[in-house]
Image: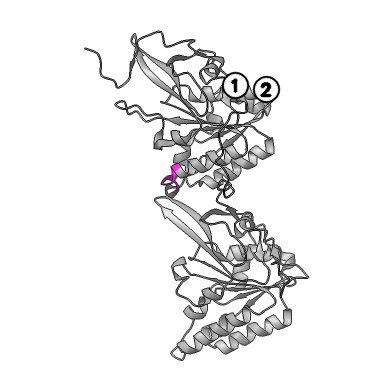
Amino acid sequence: MTDKVDLRLLATGVPGLDTILGGGLPELSFNIIGGAPGSGKTTFAQQIMFGLASPAKKALFFTAMGEPPVKMLRYQQQFDFFDLDKVGDSVNFISLAPQVEEGNYDAVLAQILEEVRMHAPSFVFIDSFRSFVQGARGDNVEVAALQTFVQHLVAHMTTWHATSFLIGEYTTNEADQNPIFTVADGLLWLNQYVQRNTMSRKLQVIKMRGQQQRPGLHAFRIGRPGLEIFPRILPAPEPIGAEPPMHTPVGRLSSGVAVLDEMLGGGIPAGYSVLLSGPTGSGKTMLSTEFLAAGAAAGEKGVVALFERSPSQMMNVKLDALVRSGQVAMMSVRALDLSVDEMLHELLSLIDKTGSTRVVLDSLSGFELAMAPEYREDFRESLYRMATVLGAKGVTVMMTSEMEDRFQELRFSPYGSAVLVDAVIMQRYVESQSEMRTVISVIKVRGSKHSRQIRSFEIDDDGNIAIGDGPAPFDGIFLGNPQPR
């Protein structure tokens, strides 16, 4: 046998699913969809079914137990993917509940086989498969007979000229305990996690034979359109044997403040990620607005993602004008159960839609608070992925970060995130002549010389930024340092 057999991949129609499956669902595969009650298994299965079924490729949906088909259909019709015109023609719902409750598994198997013979479907779904066990009634149900039924059913499903699915209340821990999982071509698990007052949903492809699926847990949401999956975004792997990429500035972008450009060694290298850290009220948002304004003046589009304020709370006249003119697109994110992949998908979509080359994230502190609790534990890894993916697109990113008021130590960034970015600009407060004053300094610019001077930083009543031409002309005392005696 010399000819290679290529698996035909089916486009499921579920946003994000084909990406994590490795291109689509293999035709004629036998799949199991598992998860806890309420995790979205039935909705997920029917969204796939309505996306795939057509008059030429019919689908059968067997309900073994639980809610009657009429009740299930009543609720499933609320989703946009549900197509009533397909019901009874391209899609047929068949109840197996009476035979299952009696424990008459021979009759159940006979009915399934007869329906498959009559309709010759391209897609077969059985929901919920676990009901065959849990719905059994009476002492006459023998374990041996049940096991025989399961083995015969699975054997038939793997030989049908159809793509088939078993749906059940299984957990990932059971995948290595039940023999039916070993013969399945695909294992898809839906999980939901509750921490404090937030809940997040995740999908994992445990196995998909014949293709390379995207690993990890992928966030998803259930809304009026159905399930929307946000594939875990990973930096592109480097080719084996390739030399590690070197950061060589290919061009400089203006920060919007001429003196700061000089401190940076000629501006911000294009494609760099810049961390702008400082205490509250030090002018981080104003400075990042100048960065976007400089891009707009040069004909560049920009995107600003707000994690702390809603658009109505922006309180920045220049930024408001940039947004209203269409030169800067705004993304407001305030959800308390956000995943980094959801945010990245929306951000990348906005960048592609507008053709933006400058991005401002204001702020990382607000971004952390917007994330679901379990994502906060991996915030540093999330920040690395975000900076790497955005850098790969060639956009220049400025991220603001509020430093905690720890006056007895000098810190450049929270979570040690300074090592994850290409440049760091830091603002600090000093006490001088009975006033609180702000100073600014450049901590690092990867692959470039830069000034290490501490210079004064002021914002006048009109919102204009002024940075000193040389070292701060006063002998200020940094807040938290011991007072001289």
Q: Which label belongs to residue 82?
A: none
Q: Looking at the figure, which quarter contains the C terminus?
A: top left
User: Does residue 182 lie above or below 142 as drawn?
Assistant: above
x and y percent of residue 34 in the render? 52, 67
In terms of secondary structure, where does tag 2 sit?
loop
Residue 377 in magenta? yes
Residue 165 seen = yes
Bounds of the magenta segment: 375-380
User: Does residue 20 lie above or below 272 as drawn?
Assistant: below
Which residue lies at the image location 52% right of the left edge and 22% below the top edge? 287
x and y percent of residue 355 in the render? 68, 35
User: Does residue 247 lie above or below 92 as drawn?
Assistant: above
Give the quadrant of residue 380.
top left
Q: CA gap, disc 1 to disc 2? A: 9 Å
Give the quadrant of residue 440.
top left
Q: Amino acid at mark 1?
A: Ser
Q: Amino acid at mark 2?
A: Ala
Residue 289 in magenta? no
Which residue lies at the image location 71% right of the left edge and 69% below the top edge? 4
- Please give the residue where the numbered disc 1 appears in the rendered image: 254
x and y percent of residue 411 in the render? 37, 29
Q: Decide: marks 1, 2 in contact (CB < 8 A)? A: yes
Q: Which label belongs to residue 298?
A: 2
